[in-house]
Image (cartoon, rainbow, N blue to C red):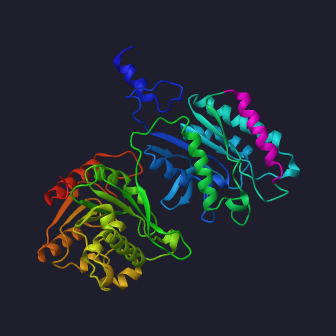
Amino acid sequence: MTMRILRACLLAVLLLPLSMHISAEQRKQQRFSIMGLGDSITEGSTSFTCYLYPLWEKLMTGGYEFDFIGPNNSPCRIGTLNTCGFGGKTVEFLDSKIDSLYRIYPADIVLLHAGHNHSVDEHPVPGMISAYRSIISKILAINPRAYIFMAEVIPSGKLPKYNYIPDLNKQIAKMVKSMNSSQVILVNQCSGFDWQRFTIADKVHPNKLGGEHMAAVWFKALEQILKPAPNVYKFDIVPYKTLSNADPLTLHIFQPSKRGGAKHPALIYFFGGGWHEGTPIQFYRECAYYAANGFVAVSADYRIELLHHSTPFDSFEDARDAMRWLRMHADKYNIDTMRIVASGSSAGGQLAAALGTIPNRDGGVSYRPGLMVLNYAVVDNGPTGYGTAQMKARYKEISPLDNITPATPPTLFLLGTKDPLIPVATAKAFQQRMEQNGVYCELKLFLNAGHPIFLYRKPLAKEFYDVRKVTDAFLRHYHYLP
């Protein structure tokens, strides 16, 4: 076997059974794809919680490189996730479509959960079992290396319509056992799923707790076959603000590898998403990196329109409170309060920039950072800038460009030359106004990059490492980074 063929074989190995010996080199985790296959419980909706997003969170937090694939979209706090969920459809429908679907979306892993949309009066179980068998055989005929996780379906309180589900689950377990295949794995989504606690008012679709429960069961099953991820993120999630009728807002805190001694600089990130969507997970890579280099690195959650029906003014209030919380708890985390960096991307960059520019009108603890690192930040919220109508009407309260003073901290501004939302001219106007106030502002333009400069949910491009290199140099210049 030539070295070229040997390398090709090694690169082709995405997943390995745990029983196989895994060398140190093979443990380098390869990107894999997942297809969620099922009905509305898999497709998701704005009225109930799909398991896909909480599973995405678990996989991202675990350090895995992966993609959800499929023709449909499941709504969630990061926008959408791709899925093969078809609301209102039966397992027989999925069987009729899977051959063409799987050829277009040949996932490494298929999560099959489908069992509703029949009625007990139809005596549907034998036909459903036949359809499951057909789906599995068609997938394996196309890709013998695929893993199919066959779920015993979640119970429902919509009775007597779904009285057939207990028998269905027994037959699913028997079917998987009879197949005797290491590629087909039974997942017990039934046991432990309490429909009274885990479903919305229709007694069928999962609520937030139900979606998280399903995701935890899927994740535990996936751990049977996934190779260990090289970068498992280690952090603490700490509430910093209590909301009425909603979960508390939290800080995801990555502490430095070596603690003690001199106080640490801190870096707080705010995710992008137009003040409408997004997640603190966006900056886990950056937080882990800077924690390994001596920072207390924090990714902050804040109110977004999708979850809280909030405005950008609410988001800024949360950013302000997050920074104040960090200062007020500096002793606990051994933070040097004179060396706190505010950073973020897009709308999150606007929040970071606002912390450094908007005056402290209420006289509380200072929220002004020592430095700002702005990634394609929305700095102009004026009448001709970017933002909601409410922002533009009240832009002097919120627009960083219109609130720069000599007290504004030194800033690194990173922007793509093809950004469709933030013109290069806007960034240059920000830089000029900073310099007019005697404040250093470095503008780094990335040739032909757009908005964002790189996609954190996709395989990392050269731009990711270029951003890190430029940011490191800026932090070193001000002695925040060794």
Q: Is residue 388 magenta?
A: no
Identify the image quadrant of the N terminus.
top left
Q: Quadrant of residue 196?
A: bottom right
Dominant SS of magenta comes to helix
Magenta-span inclusion, residue 166:
yes
Estimate the x, y position of residue 22 in percent, counting from the top left: 45, 26
Name above or below for residue 469 compared with residue 201. Answer: above
Q: Is residue 92 visible?
A: yes
Q: Residue furthest top?
A: 1
341 over 161 or under it: above or below: below
Q: Which residues are magenta?
A: 162-180
x and y, in percent, of residue 166 in the image: 80, 46
* The residue positioned farthest toward the right in the image shown: 121
Residue drawn at x 39%, y 20% as measured from the top left: 6
Give me the residue at 32% from left, 79% from top: 398
Horizontally, residue 101 falls left or right of residue 366, namely right
Q: Position of residue 404 (x, y in %)?
A: 21, 78
Where is residue 87, by image quadrant?
A: bottom right
Q: Is residue 233 left or right of residue 468?
A: right
Q: Residue at point 19% right, 69% down?
A: 428
Describe residue 81's horizontal placement relative to residue 86 as left or right. left
Q: Is residue 421 visible?
A: no
- Residue 188 vertical position relative to residue 443 in the rendered view, above or below: above
